[in-house]
Image: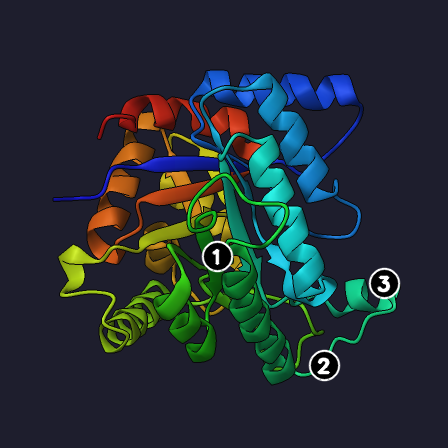
């Protein structure tokens, strides 16, 4: 049986307290299941933003999408997580990643390191959070037991292995650092390559004895939709976007879960197809796509 859909929106801007509260209430009214906050310099600080969102909403879960582990000391992060989970009445979902924007580390005066070093720190952070948040003596205590659900995002083998062992939700980037481009640049991989990444994750999950087969995985799969483009001509829209993904064909762009093009019913069918092909049931959109995606939620909720 297919896993039910969930839909999240990553809220990126903070104009005022009143505007933030109103935006969170509106996202709930539009049917979003999860309200999310990123962890980039220039965006709102995630934990106070989520605690405030909890005060003005009732139904949605609240998550980080995703914390840059390189910004955080694990013990201090455990305190933030437990506090935020308590203040949101157990609605927190913790998303973690290794970080990929060197300029942000430079601005913060923090070491960036190699990809391997960043993943090493993420591995250490996950282990420490597991240890601290499941310790009955840890204060403050989180509301959820044994800890809030953990989302791990990435694309490489080490990150997918980590997600297979520890995550409740695995978030796939569907993008990679292209050779010769500035550090932190991401470019879409093909749908076929994305299938390969998911197949690798399934193998790692089987190795970790977390699954008994593709249809029985207990780990929810997430994908971030980069663009929601209402249009009467999907192919024309794909041709407009071709310069942003020069290695992909028009057909590959139309098949890619990063791009959602068409009318609401067409988009809903695309997400059903992505769930069937890739296993994604939890989709996230960016704040500027929140309104455009709402009719798709209406089409799919309950499906």
User: Which numbered marker is on residue 134?
Assistant: 1
For image coordinates 65% across by 16% down, the residue present is: 22
Q: Earlier in the sequence, mark 3 or mark 2?
A: 3
Location of residue 173 in the rendering, given as x and y in whole percent from the top left corner:
48, 60
Q: Is residue 125 above or below residue 45?
A: below
Q: Answer with the quarter of the image where residue 165 lies.
A: bottom left
CB under 8 Å between callouts 3 and 1?
Answer: no
Q: Is residue 243 visible?
A: no
Real-space CA distance between mark 3 and mark 1, rounded to the nearest whole angstrom: 30 Å
Real-space CA distance between mark 1 and mark 2, rounded to the nearest whole angstrom: 30 Å
Outermost front residue? 137
CB under 8 Å between callouts 1 and 2?
Answer: no
Q: Nearer the viewer, mark 1 or mark 2?
A: 1
Location of residue 139 in the rendering, given as x and y in whole percent from the top left corner:
63, 49
Location of residue 79 in the rendering, given as x and y in whole percent from the top left corner:
67, 51
Q: Earlier in the sequence, mark 3 or mark 1?
A: 3
**Residue that mark 3 sits on:** 108
Q: Nearer the viewer, mark 3 or mark 1?
A: 1
**Residue that mark 2 sits on:** 113
Q: How is the image coloured?
A: rainbow
Horizontal side of 185 relative to 220 (left or right) equals right
Determine whether the residue tagged by mark 1 lies in a helix, strand or loop: loop
Q: Residues within 10 Å of mark 3 (few under 14, many from 20)?
A: few
Determine whether the residue tagged by mark 2 lies in a helix, strand or loop: loop
Determine whether the residue tagged by mark 3 lies in a helix, strand or loop: helix
User: Which numbered marker is on residue 280?
Assistant: none
Q: Is residue 32 above or below residue 153?
A: above
């Amino acid at each position: 049986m297919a896993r039910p859909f969930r839909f999240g929106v990553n809220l990126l801007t903070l104009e005022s307290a009143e505007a933030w509260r109103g935006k969170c209430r509106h996202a709930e009214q539009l049917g979003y299941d999860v309200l999310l906050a990123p962890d980039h310099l220039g965006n709102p600080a995630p934990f106070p933003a989520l605690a405030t969102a909890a005060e003005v909403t009732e139904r949605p879960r609240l998550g980080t999408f995703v914390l840059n582990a390189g910004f955080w000391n694990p013990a201090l992060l455990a305190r933030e997580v437990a506090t935020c989970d308590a203040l949101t009445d157990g609605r927190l979902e913790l998303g973690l990643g290794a970080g990929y924007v060197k300029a942000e580390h430079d601005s913060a005066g923090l070491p960036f390191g190699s990809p391997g070093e960043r993943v090493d720190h993420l591995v250490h952070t996950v282990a420490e959070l597991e240890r601290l948040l499941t310790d009955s003596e840890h204060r403050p205590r989180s509301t959820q037991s044994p800890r809030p659900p953990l989302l791990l995002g990435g694309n490489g083998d080490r990150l997918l292995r980590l997600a297979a062992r520890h995550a409740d939700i695995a978030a796939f980037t569907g993008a990679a650092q292209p050779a010769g481009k500035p550090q932190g640049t991401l470019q879409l991989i093909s749908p076929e390559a994305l299938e390969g990444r998911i197949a690798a994750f399934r193998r790692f999950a089987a190795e970790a004895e977390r699954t008994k087969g593709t249809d029985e995985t207990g780990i929810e799969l997430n994908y971030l939709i980069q663009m929601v483009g209402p249009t009467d001509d999907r192919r024309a829209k794909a041709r407009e976007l071709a310069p942003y993904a020069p290695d992909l064909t028009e057909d590959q762009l139309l098949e890619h879960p990063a791009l959602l093009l068409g009318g609401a019913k067409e988009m809903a069918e695309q997400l059903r197809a992505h769930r069937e092909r890739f296993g994604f049931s939890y989709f996230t959109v960016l704040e500027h796509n929140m309104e455009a995606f709402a009719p798709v939620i209406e089409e799919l909720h309950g499906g």
